[in-house]
Image (cartoon, rainbow, N blue to C red):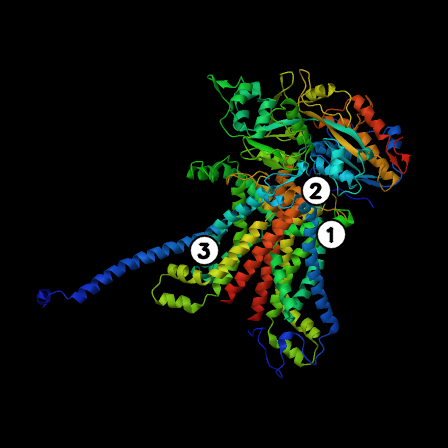
Amino acid sequence: MISSKSVSGLNGHDFTRGVMPRVKSGRFYSYVLRGSAVLFAGVLVLFVWSIIQQSWPAWSHSGLSIITGTNWAPADSQFGALPLILATLITAGVALLFAVPIGIGTALTLNYIIPPRIASPLTVLVELLAAVPSVVYGLWGLNVLVPWMSTTIQPWLAGLTSGGWPFSGNAIGLGLVLASTVLSIMVLPTIVAISRDVIAVVPRDLIEGALSLGATRSQVLLKVVVPSAKIGLLGAVSLGAGRALGETVAVAMVIGSSPAMPHSLFSLGSTLASTIATQFIDSSPQQLAALGALAMILMFLTASVNAIARALVQRGVKG
Amino acid sequence: MTDLLAKLPPDPLLERRRVVQLMSQKTQRARSLRSSLFLSLLVSALMVAIIPLFFVCAALVQRGFKVLSWGFLTQVPQQPTLMQQDTIGGVGNAIIGSLVVDGVAALVAVPLGIILGLYLSETQSRPATALRSITEIMTGLPSILLGVFAYVYIVLNMHAFTGLAGAMALALLMTPVITKAAETALRNVPRTLTEAGLALGARQSKVSLKVVLPVAAPGIVTGVLLALARAIGETAPLLLVMGASIQYEWNPLHPMSALPLMTFNYSSAAYDSQHAAAWGVAIVLVAIVLILNVVSRLVAAFMRRERH
Amino acid sequence: MKINIRGSFAVVVATAGLFASLSIPAGATTVKLDPILASDTQLSTTATVASAGATFDTPFFSAAYPIYASRTHNATVGAYGAGGSGAGQTAIMSNTADFAASDVPLTQANIDAATTISSRGTLASYVQVPVALGGVAIAFHNTAITTNKLYKANGFIVTSAILAKIYTGAITKWNDSAICAANVKWRVKNACALPNATITVVGRSDSSGTTYIFRDYLHTAQPLILTAAPSKSTFVTSTNGFVGGSGNQGVATNLENTNNSLGYVEYSYVLLNKSLDAALVVNAANKAVAINQAGIAAAAATKPSVDSTNFSIVNASGATSYPISGYSWVMLRKDSAASSLAQAQLTVKLVDWLAHSAPAKSGLTFGQDVATQQGYVALPTAAQNVTRNALKTITYNGAQVLK
């Protein structure tokens, strides 16, 4: 297959620019194309501006206390979002703690261990995990996982630390630990898909060289493939992190919607995204501005994580 | 002869070699045991990754099927009362609502996405690269932010909660996905086709539209179906901008319901019959999304077979 | 152009009147059109009314709207957008609803705080009338307690001190000494028989008038423990926080899904949920009363004349009064912002119908009759008369709407 990046030479003209000299490209056509690009870019600018605009009254009223304050009580005009930020980071972090090893392990398995004929349908199954809507995960977490968590998993976890941190507190099923669990299931397909792409470009001669030196298969995977792909894998993890930070509905349904500062993994909490979702509709205008501020923090967080992730993945896939 | 050999002093080199061989056999066994253990750990990771899917499907079937009926799919919701706690009506209005909102979203996102895909695949300028990067970053942004955007620019200006606002938020969600799929599909069309068309004297626009696009069509269709599947399942942006409605509503300028919205609301509703109904709506939603996914895969497989 | 209603957290919505005839509660006779009423409820042109607000009233409004709409010519009663009392106040201030419900009336302070709503006006721009009288139940879900033999005979008793301490985190266990002391009959072999489990506290995550009534009660009865003046905002307990629910139905769902949980919801939500039970609350006369319509009515009787500035009936005196009772209010614009006379008429007439009981032996069904079937108490006659007079002050283009 001819790469689209190759410059073929018909009279030496450069065909990569899209406009062939001495051939009309169709002025209407290029206007439509360029116009749409400008339009879309404009919409993106508006999008960012809308969030800034919505949040401005809150920033000018409360300033940085939104990020540092610990009391989120909108009806009392208190907008300290630190508990929300912490809950966001904790749930995403714990979710990644599980999703990363399982995800990379799954990617390695699908690429190197399982024969391709069996790997294809299994890949489809992993990708279907991503197709399930967030609200269905929330419903499942709420009705199926909550009883299981509160009667089985949480007591077991508390037993591990004898009721100490981080498994201290009342085990009711809902809370950070369930939100992290659901999140890890939801970001798994992303990590698997990107990891597979990244692992697939590890040069075959590296692997064969290691094998010929007598390395076992696990040594090849652990000491050759993973280190070779580590930048790209980091990118996959970052993409997963971006998704975990922004996941809204499933988290809102299982995290308990409590604005209090989380103390342990069993605590209830509320993330940035889940707070916006649950409180937006019945908010006073002042609270709407504060929620806009939350949106801005979330946008900044996820955009930067995603940007870093893309850069890493591109480096990783280029080899 | 052998006793003669036995009387010979032991050859240190032979001895060394035998000892090394024995040791290496042991370490070899240990190493391959370790390797096998690690590999089985990896395979178990795969198993762990797949298991939740089965649990979710099992729960959906177990709890959702019994709520389904023709009436459930076609009637509008009814309010249960203390005396009649099981009259919940149906979710027909949510199905129509999803149809309208996602249809309008697709009407905007599909042409825009394809045009942007054409633009990005043909232009190499710096603005194009910047647009590509930003578009890719957008695919990872939380959808609730799109809801805030739609609220600020559409709901506040129209002074109403409308299906249109939801549709625009979803269009903004779908466009980057379709753009990326379109660009990839267009770039994968062999350059020779483009060059042949240009060499025959056709304009770039004609070549793109009449030659390249049809060849890239399966890839684009795959992307469109996947974007649609994602948009149908999105709840967060709709929560903020759609309002509430319990009638059949075809006009996007009115508030309307949608399948994911109804699932979310029913999950925390007052009556147990509504909690059960949440699973019924969920199974309808998942069925639609899965069908779209399967169809997009079939199209992709068809495309792969076509090339070889 | 009339603005439509918001409130997408409520599925507890009214059916469009034209579809539902099934929701007429059993026990009500078929609605007859009294000749006087017939003319009263017919509108000249088609009109739609939009309403929003407190989830306290959702069971009432959802059952009542279809009945009204089925008798009224040319009227469409839009689904009730139950987003909470705070949302209702915002809705009426920004004119996105024709009338809004809230468990605590609008105050000048609320209006002053809404700086971004240009149409908010002043307190004098609004008419506020009581539309429902109900109680806030202390609902709990504890299978160990409810399956115990002692429960049938003695119930589960709480006091204001216990509730205040639960909601500030001072009491965390079901068998705390204070709770055991209040439940003297719960003893087996001279030891407290209440379960040794942690209480999971459930509260509201949104701006709630029900929270206001509950906090009003705790502040009135236990001012030293709950020092802050009541407001619509949530509590935050010190240790584990509480499980937040959106709307009364969200709290009810959380209670249903979590064993060993306790929370406050409007009475009908306990009635319609089989897993929830209501605790007996010790009132100001030191009697443990169950929540029922008689208790709520007794509490209301201690303050016969209520208005939007003097409305609190919590911790009422009287041996049979239920201490956590309260009114729910409807707010309308005094100078109607409707887009047509028919719409203004529909709005005012609907509110009028909701706030009144049918004349005795008339065989008709008015709003308060529907309310009593849903677990509320009919508004006292004095309150109903005051309401009609207040509604008569509403004008559309200068002309009185309700004659």
Q: Nearer the viewer, mark 2 or mark 1?
A: 2
Which of C127/C153 is in front? C127
Q: Distance between the Cα atoms at labels 2 and 1?
A: 18 Å
Q: Nearer the viewer, mark 3 or mark 1?
A: 1
Q: Label 1 is placed on what type of residue?
A: Tyr
Disc 2 + disc 3, Cβ < 8 Å: no
Q: Determine whether C238 is above or below B241 in the image.
A: above
Which of A53/C23 is in front? A53
Q: Label 3 is placed on what type of residue?
A: Gly
Classify mark 1: helix, strand or loop. helix
The residue labelled by disc 3 is A105
The residue labelled by disc 2 is A286
Disc 2 + disc 1, Cβ < 8 Å: no
Q: From the top left corner, tell me how far across and down residue B228 is, in percent.
A: 65, 56
Q: Can residue A130 be seen?
A: yes
| Number of marks | 3
Q: Determine whether B110 is above or below C246 in the image.
A: below
The residue labelled by disc 1 is B153
